[in-house]
Amino acid sequence: MTALDTPRKIRKAPKKVPENLIYEIMDGKPVYYKGYRQVLSGEKSIVEIMGSSSLQALIVFYLSAFIGKFIDEEMYTVLINEAGLHIDHKNNLANDIAIFEQTVLTPDKISRKYASVPPKIALEIDIDADVESMTETGYIYKKTQKMLDFGTQKVFWILTEAQVVMIATPERIETLHWNQEIELMEDNKFNIGAYLSKKGVIVN
């Protein structure tokens, strides 16, 4: 996790940033998509910074397919694709994969708006936010704590550069290499490293 703590020179955000470049809202302040400054300068398009890398997309597919093999849809609802989560009027977050208990995310709460109840489990693959105002580790811990305080039981961070999985619960936080068998829920375990090896994918 050391590489994530590298201090960055903080630059002030431009005064006017289009709303479609806002990734999340934390403590009433916008958190922009990583690379938004390059969009404002004309170096990149919005599509370029919002799209996932092929590695991220493959991991999301693997985890989604893995969950689909055991999940009881009468008990749980799974949301993917940066599902929005409305914690309160100052905090709107996004989850790559979120598993909700159906008794919590009841059918009447499924709408065109963000979910306003906590997922039981949330999975994040890398950081899609611009975190120049804090370290990447600071962003991870801040977002994770907000999720746990809201009622999420377990938050996973899959970090492709470090090739680790961080698992956070209200009681503890641990970081494991992604080659290990890691329990997601109800004794169902995933292994990202083994899956990538099976696909012939080498991550340098």
Image (tube, rainbow, N blue to C red):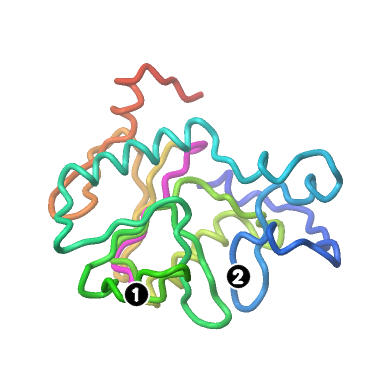
Residue at 18%, 42% in the rendered image: 69
The percent position of residue 182, horizontal first and vertical second, equals 24, 44
Q: Give the alpha-carbon distance from disc 1 to disc 2, as whole Å.
A: 21 Å
Name the residue at the bottom extreme: 89
**Quadrant in the picture for residue 29:** bottom right
Using residue 9 as the reference point, say whether residue 138 is left or right of it.
left
Magenta range is: 151-162
Name the image quarter holding residue 90: bottom right
How many residues crowd around disc 1 within 10 Å: few (fewer than 14), some, or many (20 or more)? few
What label sits on residue 25 in the rendered view?
A: 2
Residue drawn at 48 percent across, 54 percent down: 82
Mark on residue 109?
1
Residue 155: in magenta span:
yes
> Which tag, 1 or 2, sits closer to the chain's start?
2
Label ID, residue 13: none
| Residue 19 appears left or right of 190 | right
Residue 115's place in the image compared with 202, above or below, is below
Tally of numbered tags = 2
**Residue at image point 35% right, 26% down:** 196
Q: Residues within 10 Å of mark 2 (few under 14, many from 20)?
A: some
- At label 1, the amino acid type is Lys
